[in-house]
Image (cartoon, rainbow, N blue to C red):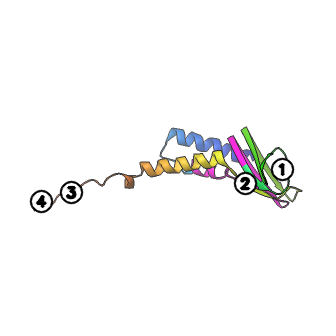
Amino acid sequence: MVACSGFIIVSGLVLVYDPSRTRLAQVALAIQIPYISSPLLVCKLISGAGLYTVLSLQPIEGFTLFAGNIWIRFQLGGYYSLAILEEHPLGIGVNWVALLLFMLLRHSLRAASPHALPAAPGPRSLNQ
């Protein structure tokens, strides 16, 4: 998981150095969006901030019951959890901070896209 944290830091530095190079930042945000918990696999990654909502029939350690079977947790800093074949409750969720940042980055790319600008007039023929 140290490699994931390093990748996230490098992707941010690349984005700051050259704002047109967004692919790494998109991947770094995308890997922070899902929360997966099951007896087979637990996968969760946060770098910076995370606001998770998780749907689970059982309590999840560190989460607060929000409504019904929906659990919520806010975290600052870096955190990861990866477990294989351990006893964990079944749950699936979303990191809303990472999802929002991912969507804003994608939106900014579309807004800056040359397709979003009016087409420039083409070269004129000498016969006109």
Q: Which numbered marker is on residue 93?
A: 2
Q: Residue at x 79, y 53 (%)?
A: 68
Dot 1 corresponds to which residue?
A: 60
Q: Position of residue 2 (x, y in %)?
A: 74, 44
Dot 4 corresponds to which residue?
A: 126
Front position among marks 3 and 2: 2
Dot 3 corresponds to which residue?
A: 123
Q: Residue at x 85, y 51 (%)?
A: 59
Tell me the amino acid under the disc marked 4.
Leu
Assign a secondary structure to mark 3. Answer: loop
* Residue extent of the magenta highlight: 25-52
Tell me whether circle 4 and circle 1 mark residues in contact (CB < 8 Å). Answer: no
Assign a secondary structure to mark 2. Answer: strand
Using the image as rendered, state which of residue 69 and residue 27 is in the foreground.
69
Distance in Å between CA atoms under marks 2 and 1: 12 Å
Tell me the amino acid under the disc marked 1.
Ile
In magenta stretch: residue 57? no
Distance in Å between CA atoms under marks 4 and 1: 73 Å
Distance in Å between CA atoms under marks 1 and 3: 64 Å
Q: Which numbered marker is on residue 9?
A: none
* Circle 4 Cα neighbour tier, 10 Å, few/some/many (<14 / 14–19 / ≥20): few
Distance in Å between CA atoms under marks 3 and 4: 9 Å
**Image height check: is 102 above or below 90?**
above
* Circle 2 Cα neighbour tier, 10 Å, few/some/many (<14 / 14–19 / ≥20): some
Tell me, yes or no, if residue 3 can be seen here.
no
